[in-house]
Image (cartoon, coloured by chain):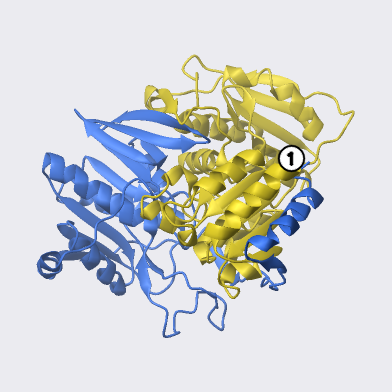
Amino acid sequence: MILVYVDHDRGVLDELSLQALAAARGIDADVQAVLIGVDAVALAPRLGEFGVATAHVGVHDGLTDYAPMAAGRAVSQLAERLQPTAVLAAGSPRGNEVLAHAAAIVDEPFAADCTSITLGDGVSEVTRYRWAGNVFEEARVHAPMLYATTALHVFAADPQSGSAPAAIVEFAPDLTPADLAVRVLERTGGGGGGVSLAEAKVVVSGGRGVGEAGFGPLEELAELLGGTVGCSRVVTSAGWRPHAEQVGQTGTKVAPDLYIAIGISGATQHIAGCKNAKTMIAINSDPDATIMSFADYAVIGDAATVMPAIVEAVRAAKG
Amino acid sequence: MNVAVCIKRVPLSPGRWSLTPDATAIDTSGSAMGWTLSPHEECATEAAVQLIEADGGEVTAFSLGTADSTEQIRELMAVGVSRGVLLETGADEWDPQATAAALASAIRDDATTYDMVIVGTESADTSGYQVGVRIAHALGWPIVTNVKGLSVTGGVARCERVVGTDREVYEVSLPAVIAVKDGVNIPRYPSVPGRIKARKKPIDTVAPTATPARLEKIRLALPPQETGTATVLGTGPEAAPRVVEVLKEIGVLT
């Protein structure tokens, strides 16, 4: 049996966790889920559609919002009791954090961002990302139970129609005040109900070639296409745009239906964050820019003249 | 307040990747290649220096690696780190468990008592997402990771992290481990006087205890190269109608 940590935010299912469920089912037909917090009770039955027969929900008075140390403690306690062959999660910031805690608590190894997993008796073999996916590492994990996360957007969520809802089994983790001290206390916006970069279907992203004053047409195009604006590290380092918009190895990794890279040369650290886009259009004055070898389509030209023309044409096409 | 930062010497990320002939490491022999710090850890150090500038105290940089890691420790001394502790290893890479155990015991056994340990959420090269978490558990301290905003008041660290379009706020009492992300601040450049002072600052060397790797690297591989077949839609503003056609074809414009 494989146990998968499924994340949620105040009762809203984390879609990325469905990728970890798909990876788990590719290894073992017997997949169980673990979710933390009473808010998860309502969403857990839906996991039946993703191959989960039983969903364990950790319930504790202190667990009212995301609490990574406590979640790690709860996951490790459940794993010690159920003795799965592996404990998996999605390689999201939260998935990597909760599994790092769980593995640290039981002093077992943890392999983050795996693209393949082969379980063995006491030794598992994994391929995992280094350098945010620019380099692959083949590794052996020496442990009776594998703690690992799956690299994002490598495994596709795989819903099965007509499957029975997952059965809910609540459990009471043994948590200390210290575990519960690390938790979300409040949230500040952001707000405004904008589209989050990580989940946007369209990302209109600008680099050095756009210039500090040139982001207006990018914002207009993003709005017309129901997407959001991203940017390269150069742009946030220069203070032209907020860090929350940075796409790349040290920023947000995105996998939209469409990524438009405008005035972005295609540094390794940027490509690591956008190479999983389904379609990429590059707009660049340099036809030899590195980004061109990653793009599906290209427009050669200066953002300052090309972008207003595209905004105009899209607006006209929408009527 | 005394702050320990944990930093790692890593190869500069190249435009084109290549591996050593035995495929166990990034090839750093090319003339354009060099070594640097993980970006998250430059920010970790800047955060530490800002805290002691406000409150007094000292920043110590701990690094597990070869003797060459002193180059990166000296760089950080030029921007405000007072002392370095090198946990000197051979050329073989240590796995995250062994690395964290060695760093935690060096921090615990150090003559200075620390109020805070600041690390990067993940290293640029091995991208393991766990050394900071393991150090926190070894020390019995709380940890907040993915931190994009940090302030300390009255022995409490207020941390912000970005989730979607929101910022989550955490507060933990010191001592604590904070794992930052690039973007939490903009690291300063070293000044010339800073570089001169750095030469005289002390670096202690300790010999950490090696344990067999439980996350054991066998070999590295490079993903398939992109073939570079972008279809050129046109040049300049005249390409706009072709862009609209593509947007319709892929279904983002209806």
Q: Position of residue B90 (x, y in %)?
A: 37, 73
Farthest residue, direction top: A61
Quadrant of residue A162 within the rendered picture = top right
Q: Residue at x 63, y 23 (%)?
A: A57
Report whether residue B138 is seen.
no
Relative to B210, say whether A143 is above or below.
Answer: above
Relative to A88, say whether A185 is above or below.
Answer: above
Residue, disc 1 = A318
Relative to A208, say whether A90 is above or below.
Answer: above
Chain identifier, colour yellow: A
**Does residue A308 appear to the left or right of A32 in the view shown?**
left
- For the N terminus of chain B, which image quadrant? top left
Q: In this orientation, which residue lies closer to the viewer: B56 or A260?
A: A260
- For the C terminus of chain B, which image quadrant? top right
Q: Position of residue A266 (x, y in %)?
A: 54, 65
Q: How many marks?
A: 1
Q: Position of residue A108 (x, y in %)?
A: 52, 47
Q: Position of residue B224 (x, y in %)?
A: 68, 71
**Does residue B181 appear to the left or right of A132 in the view shown?**
left
**Does residue B204 appear to the left or right of A9 in the view shown?**
left
Q: Residue at x 44, y 32 (%)?
A: B167
Q: Amino acid at mark 1?
A: Lys
**Does residue B77 appear to the left or right of B27 in the view shown?**
left
Quadrant of residue B94 within the rendered picture = bottom left
Q: In this orientation, which residue lies closer to the viewer: A41 or B160?
A: B160
Quadrant of residue A297 within the rendered picture = bottom right
Chain identifier, colour blue: B
